[in-house]
Image (cartoon, rainbow, N blue to C red):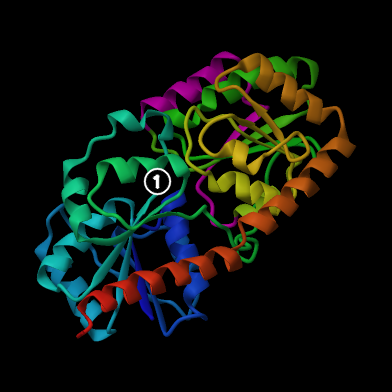
C-alpha cells in the first residue's frame, strides 16, 4: 500500500500533528509513506522521519492549477494508491481526483467545535464528499454529523493518537519554581478560553503566589491575543503567567511541569490531553468534546463544567495541595493513554479499514 498524507501547513496544530503522526507511523509498515504540505511549512517539519517522502507544494491561492499539477506529478511518479487529506486540504485532493481519477481520497475530519455542529454548513465539502472513498472522524459527534450531512457512506471513528515527542532537539527552559508549574498547551484561539486561566490565576496566586502558569501555543497576534495580554497586565499577573508561543519539543516542557490544564469552550479529542497523559501529568479539563471518554473518572483527572471559574479554581487548588494525588492521577491517565490511544492499535485498525474499502471496491468491478 502506498499512502500520502496531505495538510495545508506544518504549524503546531492538532490536525497538522496528526498528519505527521500518520506519515511517521506508516513509514515502516507500508511500501510508501509520504507527507505533503500545500501552502505553508512550520515547526512540525522537523518531526518528519527521514523514511517519509516529503513535498512542499507552495500553493499560492485557493485554486492553484500549478500546485494541482505538481501534486499530480508526485502522485503518478510515486504510484500512490491513497491520498489521505486532512481538514481543508480535501479541496486540492478533489481537484486532483478530477484530473487523475485513479487516486482514492480519504478525508480526515479534525473539526474542533463539536458543540455546534448543527450550524456547520459547507457546500464545497458536501460536493467534495462525492469523491471520497472514506471519511475518518476524530470523535463520534463528527461521525454522526458526516453520516447525516455528507455524501459518503464509508465513515469511521478513529481517536487521535500520539507518539513520543520528547526526541526533538529543542530543549526548552521555562520560568517559575520547580515543583510549582501549571501548563496549558493550546493555540491562542477564543474557543480555547485562556481567559479562564487568567481569571483563575488571579484567584489562585493570591493564596499561592509561588505557583506559575505556562502557556504554549501559536500566538496569532490578533484581538484575542491582545485581550489576554491586557488582562494579565491589568491584574498584575506578569510574574505568574508566561506565554512561550509555538515550540517544537513540547515533551521537554511537560517534563518540567506539575499540573496540566485545558479550559476549552469546545473541543474534539484534544491531542494536548493525550500528551499530558503520556508524560504522567495530572489534568484539569473542561467537560467538552470527547474529554470524558479519556478522563473517565477522578482517578485519571478532574473534569469541570465549561467556563466555571469556581470549579476550575477548586480543581487546580486540590491538585496543588496534594502531591501524592498528582502522582497517582498522572499514572492512571498514562495507563489509559497507553491502552486506548497508542499508535500501534490505531494504525493497525486504520490499515484494516483501508483494506476493507479497497477490497470492497475491487469486488464491485470484478468480472463475474
Label 1 SS: helix
Q: Is residue 200 above or below residue 330?
A: above
Is the N terminus in the top left, top right, bottom left or bottom right quadrant?
A: bottom left
Question: What residue appears at the point 63 percent right and 63 percent down from the top-left corner?
Answer: 164
- Of residue 186 and residue 158, the one placed in the foreground of this image is 158
Work out which residue is located at the far front of the displayed protein and give it: 368
Residue 252 x/y as whole percent: 67, 55
The magenta segment is 222-249
Q: Is residue 243 above or below residue 227?
A: below
* Residue 43 appears in the picture as rendered: no
Q: Quadrant of residue 175?
A: top right
Left or right of 64? Residue 198 is right
- Of residue 199 and residue 20, the one placed in the foreground of this image is 20
Left or right of 100? Residue 212 is right
Work out which residue is located at the far right of the displayed protein and give it: 324
* Residue 29 appears in the picture as rendered: yes
Residue 136 x/y as whole percent: 39, 55
Badge 1: how crowded within 10 Å, few (<14), some, or many (20+)? some
Question: What residue appears at the point 27 percent right and 73 percent down from the top-left corner?
Answer: 361
Residue highlighted by disc 1 = 143
Residue 50 x/y as whole percent: 48, 79
Q: Quadrant of residue 102?
A: bottom left
Question: What residue appears at the point 52 percent right and 44 percent down from the top-left corner?
Answer: 269
Q: Quadrant of residue 324?
A: top right
Question: What residue appears at the point 75 percent right and 15 percent down from the top-left corner?
Answer: 206
Amino acid at each position: 500500500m502506498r499512502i500520502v498524507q496531505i495538510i495545508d501547513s506544518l504549524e503546531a496544530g492538532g490536525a497538522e500533528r496528526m498528519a505527521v503522526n500518520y506519515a511517521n507511523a506508516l513509514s515502516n509498515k507500508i511500501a510508501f509513506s509520504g507527507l505533503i504540505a500545500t501552502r505553508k511549512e512550520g515547526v512540525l517539519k522537523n518531526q518528519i522521519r527521514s523514511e517519509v517522502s516529503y513535498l512542499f507544494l507552495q500553493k499560492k491561492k485557493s485554486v492553484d492549477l500549478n500546485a494541482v499539477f505538481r501534486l499530480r506529478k508526485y502522485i503518478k511518479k510515486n504510484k500512490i494508491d491513497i491520498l489521505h487529506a486532512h481538514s481543508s486540504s480535501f479541496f486540492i485532493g478533489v481537484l486532483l481526483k478530477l484530473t487523475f481519477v485513479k487516486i482514492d481520497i480519504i478525508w480526515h475530519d479534525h473539526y474542533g467545535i463539536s458543540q455546534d455542529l448543527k450550524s456547520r454548513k459547507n457546500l464545497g465539502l458536501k460536493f467534495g464528499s462525492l469523491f471520497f472513498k472514506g471519511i475518518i472522524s476524530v470523535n463520534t459527534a463528527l461521525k454522526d454529523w458526516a453520516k447525516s450531512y455528507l455524501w459518503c457512506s464509508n465513515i469511521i471513528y478513529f481517536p487521535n493518537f500520539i507518539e513520543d515527542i520528547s526526541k526533538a532537539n529543542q530543549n526548552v527552559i521555562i520560568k517559575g519554581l520547580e515543583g510549582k508549574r501549571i501548563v496549558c498547551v493550546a493555540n491562542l484561539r477564543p474557543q480555547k478560553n485562556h481567559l479562564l486561566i487568567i481569571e483563575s490565576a488571579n484567584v489562585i496566586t493570591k493564596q499561592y503566589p509561588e505557583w506559575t502558569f505556562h502557556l504554549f501555543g501559536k500566538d496569532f497576534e490578533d484581538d484575542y491575543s491582545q485581550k489576554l495580554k491586557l488582562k494579565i497586565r491589568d491584574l498584575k499577573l506578569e510574574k505568574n503567567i508566561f506565554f512561550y508561543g509555538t515550540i517544537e519539543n513540547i515533551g521537554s516542557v511537560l517534563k518540567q511541569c506539575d499540573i496540566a490544564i485545558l479550559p476549552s469552550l469546545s473541543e474534539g479529542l484534544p491531542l494536548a490531553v493525550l500528551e499530558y497523559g503520556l508524560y504522567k501529568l495530572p489534568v484539569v479539563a473542561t467537560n467538552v468534546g470527547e474529554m470524558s471518554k479519556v478522563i473517565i473518572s477522578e482517578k485519571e483527572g478532574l473534569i469541570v463544567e465549561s467556563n466555571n471559574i469556581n470549579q476550575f479554581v477548586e480543581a487546580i487548588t486540590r491538585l496543588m495541595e496534594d502531591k501524592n494525588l498528582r502522582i497517582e492521577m498522572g499514572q492512571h491517565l498514562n495507563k489509559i493513554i497507553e491502552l486506548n490511544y497508542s499508535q500501534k492499535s490505531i494504525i493497525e485498525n486504520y490499515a484494516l479499514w483501508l483494506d476493507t474499502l479497497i477490497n470492497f471496491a475491487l469486488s464491485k468491478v470484478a468480472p463475474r
